[in-house]
Every structure is written in C-alpha cells, then in structure tokens.
Amino acid sequence: DGLASADECCTLGYNWGCIGLMWNYPATGHCWCYAPTTAPTGYSWSGGGSSTITKVVPPTDSNSLDYSSIMQGYTLTPLSTCSTETLLSQGKPVTTDCVSGTPSGLVDGDTANAYTNSPYDVVGGTCPGSRKFVEIDLGSVHYIAYVKVWMEIGGNRKYCGKMLEISSDATSYTTVYDAASANGPIEFASGQTYGVYQNARYIKFSAGKNTVNNNVYFLEAQVWGC
C-alpha cells in the first residue's frame, strides 16, 4: 500500500522534501508533500480515509498536521490502457536545437552516456533562459504511458524550466509538464519519470541551464506505451 515513489510525485507536480515513500508518514526519513485535491491526469486515488489529500508536512514543521490516518493504505493508481507497456523510442529519429553532441545518443539505450555522446548545449541567461529541446518521432501515433528522461547529474544538479510536450502532427502540442521559470527536482542516475497517458507520435522535452553550470545535457530518453 502506498502512493508513488518520490521521483514519480516530483514529476506529477508535488513538492517533495526528500526521497522515499509516502504511505508510512510520519516515519523518520520519509517524505511529505503538498498534494492536489484531485488525482493528477492519468491517475486515480483509492483507499484511505478521505477522498482528498491537501497538506502533509513533517512533524518538525510549525504548521504540522498529522495526516497519517488518511495516508495509511492510500494508493495512487496509473490509468494506463496498455496491457503490456513496451519501449517505443529506442533507435527512433531525434531532432534537437542543441549544437553539440550526437542526437541519436538520446535513444541508444545507454542511460549512463557520457554527455558528449548525446545532445547538449550552452544555455546561460536567467532561468529558464533560452531552453533547448530534443524531440523523438515514434513514426506513428501510440498510446504513451510515461516518458523517462536522464540528464547529467552531480552536485545535486537541477535543471531550470523543464518541459514535456506531446503531439500527433508536430504542429499542435499539448503540454504534459512545465516547470516554467523554476528548477526541477535534483537529478539522479535513475532518471525522472513523467506520466503522460495520452496518444502521441512526437515527444518533445525541453530544459534550460542547470544549477552547476550554464549548460543543458540530455543523456537518454525512453518513451513507454503501446
């Protein structure tokens, strides 16, 4: 029983304070978040003692509220229509406005790529500055369950202005996630996951500079669906 992992919740719009699972809050070393009153797109709430979750904070917070009673047994369930989710993006064509690196390295299956083997560029400026993008063409429309993206890590690095968009025709785009002028979560070797749960052919991911230097590094992207 439990919500989702911290990585999943970060990318679904929650503000996490650490890494861990939610359901056994307020156990030491686990997390809190400010959550919406309705489930995010592509998910449903079930179980627990309430149909909404509005605020959960650590016991040390002066505004702490004990939500452990409604959190216990709460489940955030993805609504994917795929009986089996498969990797759709490996080896597919990639376009980018990054001037350095190799576009095809984004979908070569190597999540530990040296950044020089994948698209990267200097961005600079204020956050989000001039965001750079990578776009994968799946060749035809698929149902997209989620997208996973790996960026260069180290030094508790975060990237400014991360944005995920999808399209069926490369003309009209739907925004799935947009950090706007804020930094995203700390990047880890496990990557970041973005729930989509919609049909699309083109997957476009953008980001600005990171908190260590003025560059953006796209190491690997995976599109899962059916």
Image: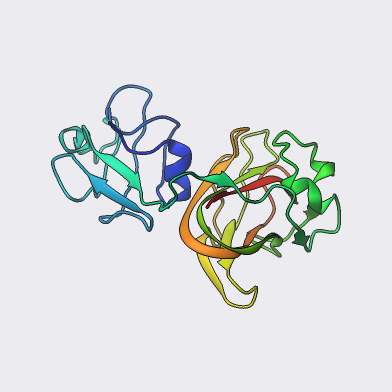
Where residue 63 appears, as percent x and y from the top left, is 24, 41
155 displayed left or right of 193: right
When the figure is inspected, residue 81 is found, relative to residue 74, above or below; the finding is below
Residue that protrudes farthest toward the left in the picture: 49
Look at 22% across and 44% down and name the residue there.
46
Residue that protrudes farthest toward the front in the picture: 83
Where residue 147 appears, as percent x and y from the top left, is 56, 50
Where residue 82 appears, as percent x and y from the top left, is 44, 50
Look at 67% across and 57% down and name the residue there.
208
> In the picture, which quadrant includes the N terminus?
top left
Q: Quadrant of residue 153?
A: top right
> Closer to the camera, 137 or 156?
137
Q: Quadrant of residue 59?
A: top left
Residue that protrudes farthest toward the top in the picture: 28
194 displayed left or right of 217: left
Where residue 143 appears, as percent x and y from the top left, is 50, 58
Look at 65% across and 73% down and name the residue there.
170
Number of dots carrying numbers:
0
8 displayed left or right of 36: right
> Closer to the camera, 94 or 97?
94
Look at 26% across and 37% down and name the residue there.
62
> Closer to the camera, 113 or 182?
113
32 displayed left or right of 65: right
> Closer to the camera, 72 or 146?
146
What's the colour scheme?
A: rainbow
